[in-house]
Image (cartoon, rainbow, N blue to C red):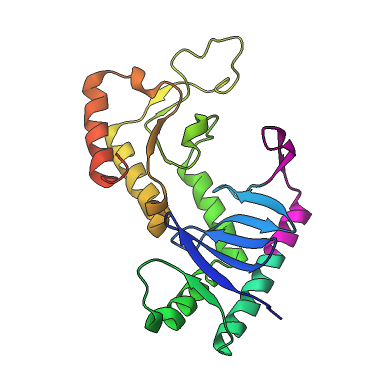
Amino acid sequence: MISRLIFSSHQKAFSLIFRPGCTYTFDPSGRPIGFYIDKRFYGRGLDGTIKEKSWEGAKDEFDRFVETVSDNRKKEIYGSLYNDLEKAENHVQDKKPYELFIPDISSNENGHIAQKILSLVRSWTSERLLDDEKEFHRLYRPISILPPDQYFTVIIQIAEGCPWNKCAFCGFYRGRSFRIRPLQEIKEHIKEVASYFGEGLSLRRTVFLSDANAFSMPHKDLLPILKEVQHHFPIQT
């Protein structure tokens, strides 16, 4: 039984709030990206990894902890999600009260929007999520590192490895040869990445060109790539 159900959206993402201490967040395609369960926050990566994030201490002085959850805990999180989504769908179908905080939606559309959101997020079954993870690994070579402000970006791998790759303190690209991808290969990569994200692309406001110092390539090779990226991601660039 659901005592309170809230649908909300913020900066393209939307959330379902079931009770204090239980919120699920999704990208515009319905792909789950965050879970807040029993006062614990979990972030889901596109590779399927779920990390628990926690903080200890006062507001102005605290320690932050990030830990990858076990496979068993991952199953529990998804179990909680699917169980609550089923309850929410029954709740809405039975015309029980809920709240909708979504901009530019008239009161006449409330029922339709709630059903549409639930249908969208429930389409992401465990099988579809597994296929999504496999597709991510097919599209990308290992992404070794991103700047802290680029975690929620569209990554386009225009090169692989590092052109220097001799720094004693860095092991991100060790054992990997540097390769500039041909323009035609990059064009296909860009199209596949755009298709992979689908509607979820609107949540990502920047494009990051990797790997390592990808801009070390000659300008005559780089400029056509930049034009291609800008053509496919005009909002983000």
| Residue 144 lies in quadrant | top right
- Horizontally, is 190 left or right of 150 in the view? left
- Residue sitting at x 43%, y 81%: 112
| Residue 160 lies in quadrant | top left
| Residue 54 lies in quadrant | top right
| Magenta span of residues | 52-78
Q: Quadrant of the C terminus?
A: top left
- Horizontally, is 63 left or right of 32 in the view? right
Residue 19 vs 94, above or below: the answer is: above
- Residue sitting at x 25%, y 40%: 230
In x, y percent, where is residue 102? 43, 67
- Residue sitting at x 61%, y 77%: 88
Query: 25 or 175: nearer the eye?
Result: 25
In x, y percent, where is residue 172? 57, 23
| Magenta-span inclusion, residue 127 | no
| Magenta-span inclusion, residue 63 | yes
Residue 83 vs 32, above or below: the answer is: below
In x, y percent, where is residue 132? 52, 56
